[in-house]
């Protein structure tokens, strides 16, 4: 069973170098590595020798198309039986590909795993499920981002990333695969390093948003409203509105927005859970 690696990158050559080193150190080598550059303006010249050394295919787009569309190009370009995704700012541990290979050899159609926080490896985030469950998906993406996701190529050819979504594309894909009844395995161990709080990451972008712009972050919630049901839908909407609240300006306006769109109960639960996490000193989740 051959595994193709699809890496998306944008203006982060220094991070991509770390990611590629991680790929080169895998105990099981992939059959190919495909890098989709989403029209970066920063030069990547310094890492071309590394790209060439692992015989990776580097595809730079002529215009910015977004991460979802970039991943979809990778799906179309890949030739392996399985496609493993990697964001340019994350790093696989050396046994990542060998571990997921074992799951696919045992009949898995898709796989997710736990992770450690890059630079603070004592923080480990895992879900105890052995198979992706509705109970966990109702709570959001309690598994991992795209750097810990892989699936059979044929499954992905029938389930491309939703390019209309501004965020939550991983959770959206997981829900769709779950609803189709594919054998979706979760490995409750940390298999990669996840980089939190990039200067150009989701958190940084959300902090600059205005409450009136929040609808663009609610696409996945509305898309799967029936799957979520009223309670979990409002909870997800509230979490999207109040995400990274402590770093935002005009906090009261964001709280009012949550009360308006999600209601008192969901807003109360959000702050109750936040307080509980702080008291228990629980690790960050994605």
Image: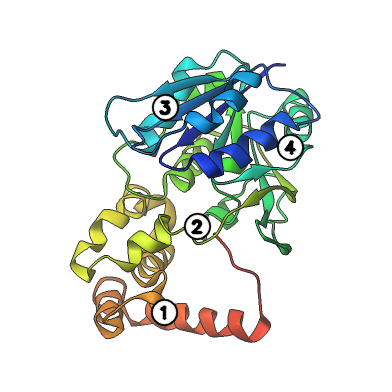
Name the disc covering residue 159, or none.
none
Q: Earlier in the sequence, mark 3 or mark 4?
A: 3
What's the distance in space between the residues labelled 2 and 3, CA to CA? Answer: 23 Å
- Counting residues from the start of the chain, the first of labels 4 and 2 encountered is 4
- Position of residue 189 relative to residue 108, above or below, is below
**Is 138 on the left-hand or right-hand side of 165?**
right
- Residue 88 visible? The answer is no
155 to the left or right of 219: right
* Residue that numbered label 1 is attached to: 246
Mark 1 vs mark 2: which is more N-terminal? 2
Q: Nearer the viewer, mark 4 or mark 2?
A: 4
Q: Which residue is mark 3?
A: 72
Seen at 59% across and 29% down, the residue is 151
Q: Residue furthest top?
A: 79
Q: Nearer the viewer, residue 109 or 71?
A: 71
Neighbourhood count class around disc 2 (C-alpha, 10 Å): few under 14, some 14–19, many 20 upward: many
Are the residues tagged 2 and 3 within 8 Å (C-beta)?
no
Secondary element under disc 4, as helix, strand or loop, is helix
Where, by quadrant of the figure, is residue 162 drawn? top left
- Quadrant placement of the C terminus: bottom right
Q: Which residue is mark 4?
A: 96
């Amino acid at each position: 069973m051959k595994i193709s690696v699809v890496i998306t990158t944008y203006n982060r050559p220094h991070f991509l170098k770390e990611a590629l080193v991680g790929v080169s150190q895998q105990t099981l080598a992939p059959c190919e590595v495909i890098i989709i550059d989403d029209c970066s303006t920063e030069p990547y010249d310094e890492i071309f020798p590394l790209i060439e050394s692992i015989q990776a295919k580097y595809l730079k787009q002529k215009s910015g198309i977004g991460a979802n569309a970039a991943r979809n190009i990778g799906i179309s370009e890949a030739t392996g039986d399985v496609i493993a995704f990697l964001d340019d700012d994350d790093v696989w541990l050396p046994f990542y590909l060998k571990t997921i290979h074992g799951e696919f050899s045992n009949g898995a159609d898709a796989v997710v795993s736990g992770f450690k926080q890059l630079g603070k490896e004592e923080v480990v985030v895992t879900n105890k499920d052995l198979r992706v469950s509705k109970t966990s998906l109702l709570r959001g993406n309690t598994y991992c981002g795209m750097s810990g996701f892989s699936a059979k190529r044929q499954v992905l050819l029938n389930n491309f990333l939703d390019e209309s979504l501004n965020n939550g594309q991983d959770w959206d894909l997981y829900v769709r695969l779950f609803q189709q009844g594919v054998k979706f395995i979760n490995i409750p161990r940390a298999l990669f390093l996840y980089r939190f709080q990039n200067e150009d990451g989701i958190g940084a972008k959300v902090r600059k948003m205005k409450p009136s712009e929040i609808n663009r972050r609610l696409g996945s919630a509305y898309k799967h409203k029936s799957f979520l049901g009223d309670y979990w839908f409002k909870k997800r909407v509230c979490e999207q509105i109040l995400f990274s609240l402590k770093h935002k300006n005009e906090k009261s306006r964001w709280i009012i927005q949550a009360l308006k769109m999600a209601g008192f109960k969901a807003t109360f639960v959000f702050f109750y859970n936040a307080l509980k996490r702080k008291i228990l000193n629980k690790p960050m989740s994605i």
